[in-house]
Amino acid sequence: MVDLTTDYLGLKLKNPIIVGSSGLTRSLEGIARCAEAGAGAVVLKSLFEEQFKLNDRSEGTGLYPEIMDYFQSGALLDYAPRKVVEIIKEAKKQFDLPVIASINCQSQRHWIRFAQQLEDAGGDALELNIYTLPIDPDKSGEEYERSYLDIVESVRKATNLPLAVKIFHQITALPNFVRRLSEAGAQAVVLFNWFLEPDFDLRTMSSLQQKGQANFHLVLRWICLLAQRVGCQLVASGGVRSGRDIVKLILAGASAVQVCTLFYQRGLGVIKDLLEETTAWFNEHGFKNLSECQGKLSFKEEALRVKGSGKAEVFLRSQYIRLYTD
């Protein structure tokens, strides 16, 4: 019998498949469907600062109380912060499934307030969905990175919840940045965040947005390069289409795998197929549990297997040459 349990953020997941933050996890009913389908954990739909301000009269929004009540009823919002708290409380009562909250803020004050509220509600862990578009020509990459670290450090001080940070791939020195996130208090980093992409409607001469496309091989590369080298766990997010994809990410060094788009396309019932395919591969190759093969094809492990190589550059160079000489 293959054991697919995995440890993520100090939580024991019955399998490495996490339903990523999305509309699939925005309600108690959605979480129930994820649990029934066999997910290892869920990440709640991200809670945004703008929603919180509508729920906090002390922020001075300038809105009439009647309009505030209208917003809070859910008429124009996906959900109000109070509702998220109730969802977490009820989910913990009803399901044996780790519930990871997700927040996205602009001000440091709200990062802290969100984290404290969600910890009080009983969330198992917290995913910080951080992103600031670097559009200021007078601001360096280091300044933007420092702002990320400040957020992690402040939230780490304010809560005891295990922390994961979901980041984007456009970082110049990603290994260094991920290591610094770990040192700032993140126990895991999720690779990667996929954002809405801009486009133009040439007929109407107007701008529009479309969902960004995940790149599985980009995720696989960086999980492989970072595993066992940056002081924290790594979780893959983006482009999983099959159980074999999950196996590849585990071999690269992932502790768990977030899936979202595939569930929208094929339904949550596909979790069963993913687990069966993953289990079949483990059986075929004689692995009894996930930890036996986790990271076996990581950059660190592969570099050690290159005979006579003491430097990672030799490994990378040999791969480049082999691609064009075989």
Image (tube, rainbow, N blue to C red):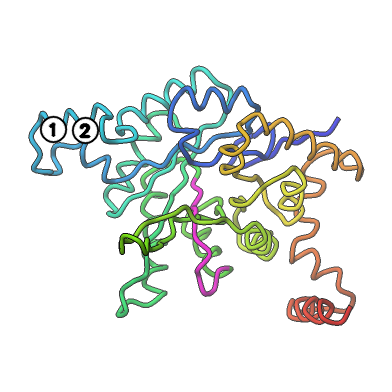
Q: Which mark is residue 91?
A: none
Mark 1 packing: few (<14 Cα in 10 Å), some, or many (20+)?
few
Disc 2 is placed on an element classified as helix
Q: Which mark is residue 67?
A: 1
Residue 23 lies in the magenta-colored region: no
- In which quadrant of the rendered image does the N terminus lie? top right
Question: Which residue is drawn at the image coordinates 37% and 30% (left, top)?
Answer: 84
Closest to the observer, 83 or 229: 83
Say left or right for 309 vs 216. right
Question: Which residue is drawn at the image coordinates 50% and 61% (left, top)?
Answer: 168
Residue 185 placed where, x, y %? 48, 54
Question: Which residue is drawn at the image coordinates 37% and 49% (left, top)?
Answer: 104
User: Magenta segment, which residues?
Assistant: 163-174
Residue 272 placed where, x, y %? 72, 30
Q: Amino acid at mark 1?
A: Ile
Which image quadrant for residue 14? Answer: top right
Residue 22 placed where, x, y %? 47, 40
State if disc 2 and disc 1 touch (CB < 8 Å). Answer: yes
Disc 1 is placed on an element classified as helix
Q: Give the distance between the C-alpha atoms of the residues marked 1 and 2, in whole angstroms.
A: 6 Å
Q: Would you name the residue on which mark 2 appears? A: 71
Question: Which residue is drawn at the image coordinates 32% and 76% (left, top)?
Answer: 139
- In which quadrant of the rendered image does the C terminus lie? bottom right
172 is higher (above) or lower (below) than 206: below
Say left or right for 42 vs 300. left
145 is higher (above) or lower (below) than 102: below
Q: Amino acid at mark 2?
A: Phe
227 is higher (above) or lower (below) than 307: above
Which image quadrant for residue 317? Answer: bottom right
Residue 169 lies in the magenta-colored region: yes
Say left or right for 132 vs 71. right
